[in-house]
Image (spheres, helix red, strand yellow):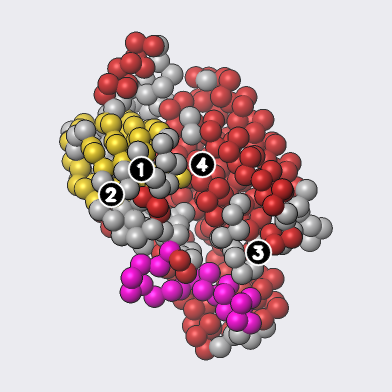
């Protein structure tokens, strides 16, 4: 995201609110709609119904009335992402369910997904405590943090091997290690991006750079290896820096703020990443290793869902059945492109018709996945 959050960065004002979330009676649903902050986003402005609200479960109702695709973020200090929703098309609506503690935040939207944009401060009041937590959700959060840590731990030796090949000047070996070095990151990307400062250094594409930002990380090296076919002192320095930046991410996993709703929203964010970067071929435009990232994103989203499933299935059995089916379908589709050595078909060999099939599968999963956060809110 994502910085893709590094892929783009126009920030325009949006908002946040408290809500009793989905899964209630019609009467409660009506109250949810009344309590949620209404956000009317255009290409140049954002109308927010209120900017102060109590801590706890929050519902953000967004209407994109502009002509550009937009994204919505809630940022804590240091641009730590509390919650977000990407890829809100013109004329469409989206709802974000989240848990937000008392404090000061900035809410932002990215019309066109480019540029710097506008931010607005919001204040969340109260003692910062959320609603009582189902012990199953507490266990899910603990298990997901352990999963994110495992992915970060596994990333370090993989990226060290990638950097070692660069330092040795071995172009072909470095190319072969590029995609594997990204797998753990792509699985746990929502946690990585929540820190705000890590993703821009490690995973920014050239078209996602802020004015004056130095281009570092995987995609700068990707361009050097494939487009320029060169390994020089600059690339060796970048490889070492990538290792250092990812070790910083690895050490910070224990301090990441993770909730059941952030897990659910993160799963949806991973599908948005696929829709806006992998399916289009923009993510790994030089190496064409998009399907490897695609598969890792799906795996990470499925892990979050499976940890939340005991509660989600109890509250919305039909949603759980749909998600089971759609995850199985998209992973079956990806398996057709997996090679004997574990790599995936180069994305430049995937036809337009096949890309459309991928896009349809992502959309088919993304729609029910957007409802997962509401299905795990404790009433």
In which image quadrant can residue 157 be found?
Answer: bottom right
Above/below status of 243 relative to 182: below
CA–CA distance in space, label 2 to label 4: 29 Å
Q: Secondary structure at mark 2?
A: loop
CA–CA distance in space, label 4 to label 1: 26 Å
Residue beneath label 2, please? Answer: 44
CA–CA distance in space, label 2 to label 1: 8 Å
Q: Are marks 2 and 1 in contact (CB under 8 Å)?
A: yes
Across and down, in percent, residue 322 comes to: 61, 27
Q: Secondary structure at mark 4?
A: helix
Relative to residue 132, is residue 202 drawn left or right? right
Across and down, in percent, residue 240 comes to: 50, 78
Residue beneath label 4, please? Answer: 267
Which residue is depicted at the point 36% across and 50% down?
111
Residue beneath label 3, please? Answer: 288
- Whether residue 317 appears in magenta in the rendering, the answer is no
Q: Are marks 1 and 3 in contact (CB under 8 Å)?
A: no
Above/below status of 150 relative to 321: below
Which residue is depicted at the point 74% across and 41% down?
332
Which span is picked out in magenta?
208-229
Q: Secondary structure at mark 1?
A: loop
């Amino acid at each position: 995201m994502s910085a893709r959050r590094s892929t783009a960065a126009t920030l325009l004002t949006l908002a946040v609110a408290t809500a009793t979330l989905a899964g209630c009676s019609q009467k409660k649903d009506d109250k949810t709609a009344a309590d949620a902050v209404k956000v009317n986003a255009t290409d140049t402005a954002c109308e927010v119904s209120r900017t102060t609200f109590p801590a706890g479960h929050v519902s953000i109702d967004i209407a994109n009335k502009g002509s550009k695709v937009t994204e919505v973020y809630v940022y804590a200090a240091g641009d730590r992402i509390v919650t977000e929703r990407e890829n809100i098309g013109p004329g469409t609506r989206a709802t974000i369910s989240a848990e937000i503690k008392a404090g000061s935040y900035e809410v932002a939207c990215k019309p066109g997904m480019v540029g710097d944009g506008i931010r607005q401060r919001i204040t969340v009041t109260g003692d910062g405590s959320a609603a009582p937590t189902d012990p199953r959700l507490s266990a899910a959060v603990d298990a997901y943090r352990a999963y994110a840590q495992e992915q970060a731990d596994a990333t370090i030796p993989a990226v060290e091997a990638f950097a070692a090949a660069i330092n040795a000047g071995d172009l072909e070996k470095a190319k072969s290690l590029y995609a594997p070095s990204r797998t753990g990151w792509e699985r746990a990307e929502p946690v990585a991006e929540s820190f705000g400062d890590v993703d821009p250094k490690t995973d920014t594409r050239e078209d996602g750079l802020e004015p004056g930002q130095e281009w570092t990380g995987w995609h700068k090296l990707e361009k050097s290896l494939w487009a320029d076919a060169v390994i020089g002192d600059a690339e060796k320095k970048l490889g070492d820096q990538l290792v250092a930046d990812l070790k910083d991410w690895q050490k910070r996993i224990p301090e990441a703020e993770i909730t059941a709703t952030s897990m659910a929203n993160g799963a949806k964010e991973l599908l948005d990443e696929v829709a806006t970067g992998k399916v289009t071929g923009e993510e790994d435009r030089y190496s064409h290793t998009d399907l490897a990232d695609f598969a890792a994103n799906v795996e990470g989203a499925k892990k979050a869902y499976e940890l939340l499933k005991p509660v989600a299935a109890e509250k919305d059995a039909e949603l759980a059945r749909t998600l089971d089916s759609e995850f199985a379908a998209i992973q079956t589709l990806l398996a057709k492109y997996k090679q004997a050595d574990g790599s995936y078909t180069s994305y430049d060999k995937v036809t337009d018709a096949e890309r459309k099939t991928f896009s349809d599968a992502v959309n088919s999963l993304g729609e029910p996945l957007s409802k997962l956060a509401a299905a795990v809110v404790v009433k």
